[in-house]
Image (cartoon, rainbow, N blue to C red):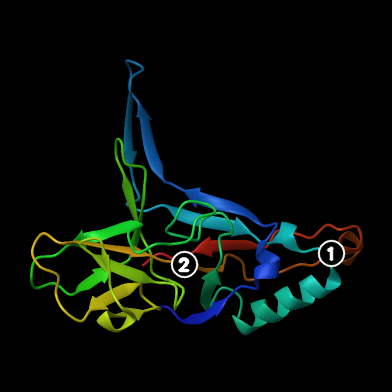
């Protein structure tokens, strides 16, 4: 059973100035010899953000409260634009259909999930992208860009379906913009009206939804 989700983005004006980024869960055991054993408990990282620092005015707070109430607090998930990491391309570059490798054709498979790879020299990490921005996705097979009619995108899951299965050995790549699926990490928002007049607002925690 999927959790309830609203396909709406948190107001961009309230994202700029927020804080946050990825976290990992690692188990570290120090042996009697002083040596360490480390084990990653999570396959994928999870992102946390704090929208509080981005609120600068009473209008911002009103916008936040309306958004929070419509989501019923943490009940409904929503899209979040990570201002530092929301593109398949390098910072300042326009997404291209050859940015990220999705897989290799086998002559049968037509469905490929979007992903973004970080690193490459030692242990590259492929992050699933489940909330691409509709209209931003470009696909290439064997380095040749496909027309818009050659594939379909499920913008709610990040699955790309090609009209024709790529030939065996053909590399499937993609370029795209994307959001992070998140929810509020609190059932309560407390606004300090005195602090607001001084330009200070309490924490507004937001956490990534992983499936």
Give the mark toward the camera: 2 or 1: 2
Per the image, the residue denoted by label 1 is 192
Disc 2, disc 1: CB below 8 Å? no
Q: Residue at x 83, y 57 (%)?
A: 200
Q: How many marks?
A: 2
**Residue 1 visible in the picture:** no
In the image shown, does 26 or 142 lie closer to the viewer? 142
* Quadrant that contains the C terminus: bottom left
Residue that extends furthest to the front in the rendered view of this protein: 144
Q: Secondary structure at mark 1?
A: loop
Disc nearer the start of the sequence (2/1): 2
Left or right of 5? Residue 31 is left
Q: Residue at x 9, y 66 (%)?
A: 106
In the image shown, does 88 or 144 lie closer to the viewer? 144
Residue that extends furthest to the top in the rendered view of this protein: 33
Per the image, the residue denoted by label 2 is 178
Q: x, y percentage for residue 110?
A: 17, 75
Left or right of 90? Residue 172 is left
In the image shown, does 188 or 71 lie closer to the viewer? 71
Q: Residue at x 68, y 60 (%)?
A: 16
Distance between the alpha carbons at the discs numbered 2 and 1: 33 Å
> In which image quadrant can residue 50 be found?
bottom right
Q: Secondary structure at mark 2?
A: loop
Mark 1 crowd level (few <14, some 14–19, many ≥20, 10 Å Cα): few
Q: Residue at x 53, y 72 (%)?
A: 79
Q: x, y percentage for residue 130?
A: 38, 69
């Amino acid at each position: 059973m999927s959790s309830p989700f609203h396909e709406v983005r948190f107001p961009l004006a309230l994202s700029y100035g927020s804080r946050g980024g990825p976290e990992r869960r690692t188990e570290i055991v120090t042996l009697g010899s002083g040596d360490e054993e480390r084990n990653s408990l999570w396959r994928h990282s999870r992102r946390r953000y704090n929208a509080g620092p981005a609120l600068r005015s009473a209008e911002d707070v009103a916008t936040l409260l309306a958004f929070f109430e419509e989501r019923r607090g943490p009940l409904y998930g929503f899209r979040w634009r990570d201002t530092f990491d929301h593109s398949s391309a390098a910072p300042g570059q326009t997404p291209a259909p050859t940015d990220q490798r999705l897989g290799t054709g086998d002559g049968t498979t037509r469905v490929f999930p979007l992903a973004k790879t970080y690193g490459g020299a030692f242990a590259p990490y492929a992050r699933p992208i489940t909330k691409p921005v509709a209209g931003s996705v470009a696909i290439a097979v064997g380095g040749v860009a496909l027309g818009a009619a050659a594939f379909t995108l499920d913008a709610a899951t990040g699955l790309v379906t090609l009209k024709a299965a790529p030939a065996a050995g053909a590399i499937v790549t993609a370029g795209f913009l994307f959001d992070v699926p998140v929810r509020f990490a609190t059932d309560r928002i407390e606004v300090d009206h005195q602090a607001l007049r001084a330009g200070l607002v309490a924490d507004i925690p937001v956490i990534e939804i992983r499936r």
